[in-house]
Image (spheres, rainbow, N blue to C red):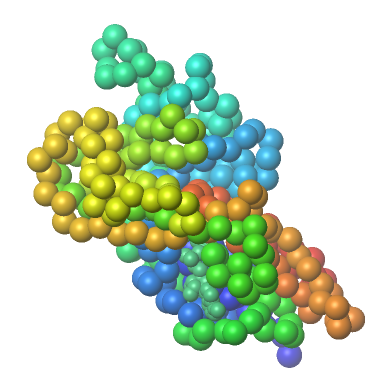
Amino acid sequence: MRQRITVVGAGVVGLSCAVRLAESGLDVDVLARDLPPETVSALAGALWLPYATEPDTPMAGWARTTLDVLSALAEDGDSGVLVVPGYLRSRASGRPRWFDVLDGTDVLPVDPGTAPGAGQWQLRVPVVDMSRYLPYLRSRLEAADGTVTRMSLPRLPDRGLVVNCTGLAARAMVQDSSLRPVRGECAVLAAPGVRTWRCREEPDRTSVSYVLPRGEQVVVGSTSVPEDGADRSRSSRVAALLARVTELVPELRDAPVLHHQAGLRPERSAVRLEVVGRAHSRGGADAVVHCYGHGDSGITVSWGCAEQVTALVTERLN
Ligand SMILES: Cc1cc2nc3c(=O)[nH]c(=O)nc-3n(C[C@H](O)[C@H](O)[C@H](O)COP(=O)(O)OP(=O)(O)OC[C@H]3O[C@@H](n4cnc5c(N)ncnc54)[C@H](O)[C@@H]3O)c2cc1C
């Protein structure tokens, strides 16, 4: 009998790993406390933008792979992915280092004389409607005979090959105190005229403000507030967010706010992506592949991580 692989977690990371594993011919079961629309992943904006990525790092490679996969998915009208032209206002002097990830993709400096703001770049990157994309991933998994079952686990299964994609919950699941919750907030505004995305790196260099077109609406984001730190009230956070995005797109000044969404990002100094054998195990196919701690980049690096997880699992099975 073929060994089944258990993926714990049905956010963008768990589903991408499960799809890759299942489409490479393996039998995959996803177990998750929250199903795709209830996950943190469902609350993301979401823009492919590895703005904090250093060249020649695993993150850069994962982001590159993900760019290729998402760009191809944009051809499929059911995926919820579009490749959209937009403008990035960068804080770097000169060409941002992370542009190396873009490789063949066209990036044009915008003439400060003819466009708002200096240090501005025009580029085309994937923008993902998570309300369509997560169900799309689930149906792709099921088409490859994978299963998704709601189940809240007190700990990771202690037998077999398990892929741990529990996001922030890995903190308790595998006692990883280096994971910390960072609150991110987006708002959806009625704004039928906006067709390009706009994004600005904020002075702290660890967050961005963005406006993403979505049909007759825009998604604006995002806040980045450690849960354990001093915090302003939600209303003042949202007011500050709206002020920032109105600087980016002045037409949003009077746009009605339709709703807000907020979630806790799984922040870690680096993504944990590694295979760990079990103390009691004699065989290679009895191990845990950890894949969590993606902070504000879960969508941006999802397919690259899924590919590496699949390579680690396949290695173990062989
Ligand atoms: C407002 C906001 C905007 C964002 N914008 C972007 C963006 O533009 N671009 C980008 O790349 N990223 C963005 N992010 C970050 C991105 O959303 C995260 O990095 C990503 O969602 C993490 O995915 P995940 O699958 O690891 O975790 P999650 O989506 O949290 O999924 C974790 C899964 O594990 C399951 N689980 C946990 N505990 C258990 C248990 N005990 N038993 C069973 N199952 C369990 C959960 O139920 C869930 O299914 C944003 C985040 C927020 C909040």
The answer to whether residue 140 is above or below residue 56 is below
Using the image as rendered, state which of residue 233 and residue 274 is in the foreground: 233
Position of residue 73 measured from the top left corner of the image (x, y, whole percent): 43, 53
Q: Residue lying furthest front in this view?
A: 230
Q: Nearer the viewer, residue 298 or 1?
A: 298
Which residue lies at the image location 25% right of the left edge and 57% below the top edge?
260
Q: Is residue 199 above or below residue 169?
A: above
Does residue 242 sit above or below 97 in this rendering? Answer: below
Specify the quadrant of the image occupied by residue 294: bottom right
Q: Position of residue 72 (x, y in %)?
A: 46, 49
Q: Residue at x 24, y 30 (%)?
A: 247
Residue farthest toward the right in the current orientation of the protein: 282
Q: Position of residue 101 (x, y in %)?
A: 57, 35
**From this viewpoint, which residue is outermost toward the bottom?**
1
The total number of labels drawn is 0
Side of 113 relative to 64 (left or right): left
Quarter holding the C terminus is bottom right
| Residue at the farthest top position | 113
Residue pictured at 64% horizontal, 57% vertical = 178
Residue 145 appears in the picture as rendered: no
Nearer to me, 256 or 78 = 256
Q: Looking at the picture, how far across and down is residue 206, in whole percent?
A: 49, 38
* Quarter of the N terminus within the rendering: bottom right
Seen from the viewer's position, the closer of residues 173 and 22 is: 173
Residue found at x 53% / y 29%: 99
For the question of whether residue 287 can be seen, the reply is yes
Residue 255 falls in image quadrant? top left
